Image (tube, rainbow, N blue to C red):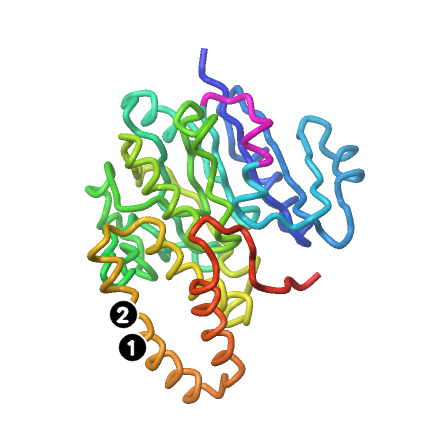
């Protein structure tokens, strides 16, 4: 008998997008057994009562507060019964064989802690978004997404195996590698939490894996949007925080000099050029948050839109 897979997704003010995901699972998935868990992460209007009627086989959790990406997923993880936890963005669409391929890969190598499939753009279905990540350069907090915005001609299929990082839009984790003491870190709210999570999997001796035979489509930027103040704050705040939490001592020191002396002036020039002057104080706020808060703080430092 196949192992149970818990498919977990988080909704925030996007009921139609989440319903499209549920439809894609029903339409394409032939793997059994599965359980589907949907967390509503403090949406302005609570969709759960209507969903419970429309989707009686789905388990819904309502949080009255927006707990962020990690916090919302952790609510689902704590309720999940599966041997494998398949965390997917609500703005993704499944394809045939997706779950089977990832489960088979995990079953064949018990040292894999977490794995991602290939990701293509939903609106440009032949265009890659993700075919793996290179390792992190902790001196600069930079790495590369392999295949990003390239036509997919299966040119990266040979990279299936270990990778630098999984992609947060779709990641299947081994439940025994997560529970009870390796939940997704809730210090970030948005961005970098999956990279922090991967580093923690590695510290526990697990592999970070990729199987490019499995495919999912992603409706990029549905959740936050491009160039929003919220995105600008958390991308900068969390880039610094990630290094503070994960980099070796020497690399950490170099980065903490590099960021204010190189990254910030470069970003400010970009803001001026693009007439985004409002992002300048946001950038300084991101730096100041890291100066005034511990690396384990869960204080967001940002007033969230409702």
Which image quadrant is residue 274 in? bottom left
> Along the line of sight, which residue is nearer the eye, 284 or 19?
284
Tell me what residue is drawn at x 20 percent, y 56 percent. Answer: 250
Circle 1: is it few (<14), some (14-19), or many (20+) Cα within 10 Å?
Answer: few
What segment is highlighted magenta in the picture? Answer: 75-83
Q: Secondary structure at mark 2?
A: helix
Tell me what residue is drawn at x 68 percent, y 26 percent. Answer: 57
Residue 225 vertical position relative to residue 147 in the rendered view, above or below: below
Circle 1 residue: 261
Name the residue at the top extreme: 1
Residue 191 vertical position relative to residue 166 in the rendered view, above or below: below
Q: Secondary structure at mark 1?
A: helix
Point out which mark residue 257 bears.
Answer: 2
> Along the line of sight, which residue is nearer the eye, 38 or 75?
75
Q: Which x, y percent locates residue 251?
A: 22, 57
Tell me what residue is drawn at x 37 percent, y 61 percent. Answer: 240
Q: Which x, y percent locates residue 36?
A: 59, 30
Q: Quadrant of the N terminus?
A: top left
Q: Is residue 13 magenta?
A: no
Q: Which x, y percent locates residue 304?
A: 64, 62
Report if the CB atoms under discs 1 and 2 are less than 8 Å apart.
yes
Q: In whole angstroms, how far apart are the C-alphas of marks 1 and 2?
A: 6 Å
Q: Quadrant of the C terminus?
A: bottom right
């Amino acid at each position: 008998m196949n192992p149970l897979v818990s498919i977990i997704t988080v909704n925030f003010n996007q009921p139609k997008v989440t319903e499209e995901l549920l439809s894609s699972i029903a339409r394409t998935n032939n793997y059994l057994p599965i359980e589907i868990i949907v967390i509503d992460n403090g949406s302005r209007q609570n969709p759960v009562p209507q969903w419970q009627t429309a989707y009686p086989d789905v388990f819904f959790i309502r949080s009255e507060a927006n707990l962020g990406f990690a916090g919302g997923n952790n609510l689902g993880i704590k309720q999940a019964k599966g041997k494998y936890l398949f965390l997917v963005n609500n703005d993704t669409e499944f394809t045939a064989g997706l779950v089977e391929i990832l489960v088979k890969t995990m079953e064949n190598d018990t040292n894999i802690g977490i794995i991602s499939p290939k990701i293509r753009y939903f609106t440009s279905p032949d265009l890659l978004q993700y075919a793996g990540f290179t390792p992190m350069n902790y001196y600069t907090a930079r790495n590369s997404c392999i295949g990003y915005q390239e036509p997919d001609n299966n040119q990266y299929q040979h990279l299936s195996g270990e990778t630098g990082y999984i992609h947060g839009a779709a990641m299947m984790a081994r439940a025994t590698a997560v529970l009870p003491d390796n939940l997704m870190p809730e210090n970030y709210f948005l961005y970098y939490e999956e990279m922090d999570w991967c580093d923690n999997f590695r510290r526990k001796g697990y592999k970070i894996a990729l199987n490019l035979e499995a495919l999912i489509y992603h409706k990029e930027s549905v959740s936050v949007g491009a160039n929003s103040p919220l995105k600008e704050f958390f991308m900068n705040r969390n880039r610094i925080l990630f290094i503070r939490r994960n980099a070796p001592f020497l690399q950490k020191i170099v980065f903490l000099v590099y960021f204010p002396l190189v990254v910030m002036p470069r970003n400010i020039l970009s803001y001026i050029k693009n007439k985004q002057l409002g992002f300048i104080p946001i950038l300084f706020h991101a730096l100041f948050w890291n100066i005034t808060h511990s690396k384990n703080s869960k204080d967001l430092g940002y007033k969230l839109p409702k």
